């Protein structure tokens, strides 16, 4: 409720009002907790009706997705207080500690190492979303730099995973923002200089909008980039590619099935014919 980051896939495009009251004066955070109780009740009833344990059908609960700590509308202390209260609210509603509760890292993965520790917090996991496409500086990198950075991220994932189980819950193959509506419905792209306002273009999206337009060299880069990321994310508990499928393959850098079909992702996830060089994981950071 209120939107935790102002993007259209949070329910509306515009202001980030999640930490503010709604039009009736009810705090949106309180509404969020009430919604979670209702969802938990539905899930418990569904599992009970099917005669199976809740954790057999529910892989986890993430209390709020991608509330970005770099957004001035998100107060990190308020966010932390919500996550603690949300943890106990969900645990009470589910009546089970077998279902993991996920904390999104708000894009600062190492800011949570002292958070929700101790016996009071059971089965808490960290969710990281790793992209190299939403920052101008990374979009200007040459392909080799993207590959190197993907491998180097294994060290960061291993560090957070030592503190608590870490899942890279979103990642993709995109290194330029040419997939449709990636920056919001009707929005342009940084790559072509049309987002967030007119600016210098970095190139044309024509070679990257459709898998049909991909060159053999580019597909080889995507294959290597995907496999290196898989290996890096395997330094934690696991990963989830975003997304499994897009409508008619319209977002080829976010479509795992299309990647497998066209050969720029491996048919068997987690196989690394183009993986990272041997990594000596560091014990001190």
Image (cartoon, helix red, strand yellow):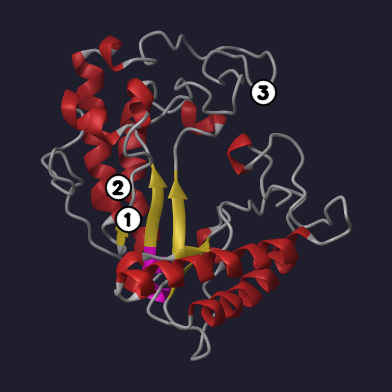
The residue tagged 1 is 154
Q: Is residue 123 left or right of residue 26?
A: left
Residue at image coords 74%, 35% = 14
Residue 117 image point, x, y percent: 52, 83
Q: Are marks 1 and 2 in contact (CB under 8 Å)?
A: yes
Residue 269 x, y percent position in the rendering? 18, 46
Q: Position of residue 49 (x, y in %)?
A: 36, 71
Q: Is residue 165 magenta?
A: yes
Query: In the image, which is nearer the foreground, mark 1 or mark 3?
Result: 3
Figure quadrant of residue 255 = top left
- The answer to whether 60 is drawn above or below residue 200 in the figure is below
- Give the SS element for disc 3: loop
149 or 247: nearer the viewer? 247
Q: Which residues are magenta?
A: 159-166
Q: Which mark is residue 151?
A: 2
**Image quarter for residue 239?**
bottom left
Residue at x 74% of width, y 53% of height = 18
Residue at horizontal 37 percent and vertical 29 percent from the top: 246
| Of 85 and 204, the residue lying toward us | 85
Q: CA distance from mark 1 to mark 2?
A: 6 Å
Mark 3 or mark 2, earlier in chain: 2
Q: Is residue 147 magenta?
A: no
Principal secondary structure, stretch drawn in magenta: helix
Pointer 3 residue? 196
- Alpha-carbon span between mark 3 and mark 2: 30 Å
Quadrant for the C terminus, please: bottom left
Say which of marks 3 and 2 sits in front.
3
Q: Earlier in the sequence, mark 1 or mark 3?
A: 1
């Amino acid at each position: 409720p209120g939107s935790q980051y102002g993007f259209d896939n949070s329910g509306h495009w515009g202001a980030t009002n999640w930490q503010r009251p709604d039009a009736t004066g009810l705090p949106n955070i309180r509404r969020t907790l009430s919604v979670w109780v209702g969802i938990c009740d539905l899930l418990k009833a569904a599992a009970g009706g099917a005669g199976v344990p809740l954790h057999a059908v529910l892989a986890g609960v993430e209390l709020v997705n991608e509330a970005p700590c770099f957004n001035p509308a998100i107060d990190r202390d308020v966010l932390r207080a919500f996550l603690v209260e949300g943890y106990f609210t969900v645990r009470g509603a589910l009546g089970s500690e077998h279902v993991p509760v996920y904390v999104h890292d708000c894009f600062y993965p190492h800011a949570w190492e002292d958070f929700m520790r101790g016996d009071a917090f059971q089965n808490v996991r960290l969710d990281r979303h790793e992209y190299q496409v939403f920052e101008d500086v990374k979009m200007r990198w040459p392909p080799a730099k993207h590959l190197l950075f993907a491998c180097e991220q294994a060290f960061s994932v291993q560090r957070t995973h030592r503190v608590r189980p870490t899942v890279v819950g979103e990642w993709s193959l995109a290194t330029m923002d040419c997939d449709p509506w990636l920056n919001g419905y009707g929005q342009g792209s940084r790559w072509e200089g049309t987002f967030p306002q007119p600016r210098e273009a970095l190139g044309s999206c024509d070679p990257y909008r459709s898998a049909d337009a991909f060159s053999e060299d580019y597909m080889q880069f995507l294959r290597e980039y995907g496999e290196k990321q898989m290996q890096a994310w395997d330094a934690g508990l696991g990963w989830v590619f975003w997304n499994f499928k897009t409508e008619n393959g319209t977002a080829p850098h976010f479509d795992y099935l299309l990647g497998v079909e066209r050969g720029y992702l491996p048919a068997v996830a987690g196989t690394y014919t183009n993986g990272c060089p041997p990594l000596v994981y560091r014990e001190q950071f």
